[in-house]
């Protein structure tokens, strides 16, 4: 059957061509970024690539969606000893070291003996303490007896006053010696034992650890003479440490005590820790604010004086975002691979904030588009090979 061309037929053909052209124009209005054919941008002029089957098997896509992208502040930090977990053991008496029970590196418990000191002065004070205690007991007994006699008018008021004076004087002498022994490191319990017959052997005095921890300094050997104020040992407990960092004044204003940060040791696992201190005064030289975190360190993995990184996140509203791992660089262009009906397209992106493994998308993608999250490196290799093969490498 032969078609007869006439004016009506020509009009129909023209209308059909215009319809197809219009549809093609509307179909090209995709929310894609500027064409990748801009050689000045450094991206290959290939819009769609066909990936081999082996590459497609390694590719995984996820739809672009709304996510929370925290604004993360990162600053260098340093691990320090928690000063509440440090004890310096000093001699409070003059004497000579008779025995050492621990050495550098030993783990010790609270109350564990560290060193025994042979001291004549201590022996003298112990004897004086016991004598004055006996004098107090005698003076008190005499005073109480006189009180009863005075009540029956058997003795004079003057005798009562004298006995009371002797009692007060004996108490004062005994209390003075007691305070000396307490200042030398003896406890009230040990003095109580002295009063009830549990006398120390000879004139040795044993210094004990006031905390659980590790001996990190030993400055004494057996036979060494010591004097009041000599530091003999240092014991520290690193089951809890401090981490210090410096923030700019603008950054510090965004946080408060109680906010939780993340400590990132080099080569170690991240540790969450509360912010417990923000300096009220900026550093005079750096104009920064010193902050402190208290970190649980039961495994003793963080070492005092170790350098770490500190992160603090600022809450922000959800936004369109993609995984940071999905981004790649092609030439000088940062972008992402998007799955299309006929293959994969490299789409340049304008990105914003980055945090929590996500990066904000400001321009280049719309919600629901399938972006490549696994196999990005493989697709990039295919893209570059096609780019070179097309003769556009120069």
Image: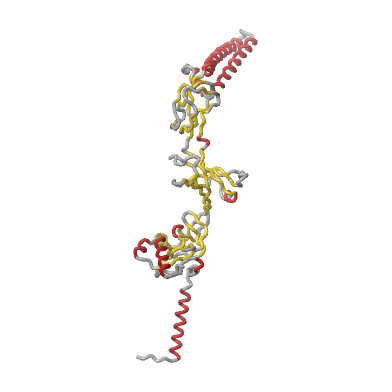
Residue 82, how many percent across, how many down? 51, 38
Determine whether 48 is above or below 263 in the image.
below
Colour scheme employed for the rendering of this structure: secondary structure
Name of the residue lying farthest toward the top: 154
**On screen, 368 above or below 194?**
below
- Asked whether, in this view, residue 44 is left or right of residue 154, the answer is left
Q: In the image, is 172 to the left or to the right of 44?
A: right
Nearest the camera: 19 or 350?
350
Residue 245 visible in image: yes
Residue 365 appears in the picture as rendered: no
Locate the N terminus by quadrant.
Answer: bottom left
Which residue corresponds to the image point at 39% horizontal and 70% vertical from the top-left?
Answer: 342
Q: Position of residue 33 (x, y in %)?
A: 49, 67
Q: Is residue 227 above or below residue 371?
A: above
Q: From this viewpoint, which residue is outermost toward the front?
A: 394
Residue 281 position in % (x across, y down): 62, 44
| Horizontal and vertical percent position of residue 80 | 51, 40
The residue located at (44%, 85%) in the rendering is 13
């Amino acid at each position: 059957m032969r078609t007869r061309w006439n004016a009506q037929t020509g009009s129909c053909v023209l209308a059909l061509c215009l319809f197809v052209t219009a549809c093609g124009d509307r179909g090209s209005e995709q929310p894609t970024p500027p064409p990748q054919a801009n050689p000045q941008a450094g991206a290959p002029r290939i819009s769609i690539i066909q990936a081999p089957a082996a590459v497609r098997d390694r590719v995984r896509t996820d739809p672009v969606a709304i996510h929370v992208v925290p604004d993360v502040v990162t600053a260098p930090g340093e691990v320090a000893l928690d000063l509440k977990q440090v004890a310096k053991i000093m001699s409070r008496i003059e004497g000579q070291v008779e025995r050492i029970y621990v050495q550098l590196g030993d783990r010790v418990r609270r109350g564990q003996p560290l060193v025994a000191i042979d001291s004549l002065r201590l022996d003298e004070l112990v004897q004086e303490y016991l004598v004055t205690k006996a004098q107090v007991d005698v003076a008190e007994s005499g005073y109480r007896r006189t009180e009863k006699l005075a009540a029956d008018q058997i003795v004079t008021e003057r005798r009562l006053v004298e006995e009371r004076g002797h009692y007060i004087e004996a108490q004062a002498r005994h209390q003075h010696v007691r305070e000396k022994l307490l200042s030398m490191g003896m406890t009230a319990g040990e003095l109580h034992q002295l009063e009830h017959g549990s006398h120390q052997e000879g004139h040795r005095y044993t210094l004990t650890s006031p905390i659980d921890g590790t001996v990190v300094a030993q400055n004494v050997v057996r036979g060494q003479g010591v004097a009041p104020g000599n530091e003999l040992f240092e014991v520290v407990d690193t089951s809890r440490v401090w981490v210090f960092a410096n923030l700019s004044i603008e950054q510090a204003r965004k946080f408060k005590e109680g906010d939780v940060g993340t400590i990132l040791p080099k080569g170690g696992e991240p540790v969450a820790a509360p912010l417990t201190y923000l300096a009220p005064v900026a550093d005079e030289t750096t104009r920064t604010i010193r902050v402190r975190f208290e970190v649980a360190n039961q495994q003793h993995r963080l070492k005092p004086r170790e350098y770490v990184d500190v992160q603090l996140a600022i809450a922000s509203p959800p936004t369109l975002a993609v995984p940071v791992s999905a981004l790649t660089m092609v030439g000088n262009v940062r972008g992402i691979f998007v799955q299309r009906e006929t293959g994969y397209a490299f789409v340049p992106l304008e990105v914003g904030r980055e945090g929590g493994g996500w990066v904000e998308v400001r321009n280049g993608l719309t919600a629901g588009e399938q972006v490549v999250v696994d196999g990005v490196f493989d697709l990039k290799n295919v893209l570059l090979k096609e780019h070179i093969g097309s003769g556009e490498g120069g």
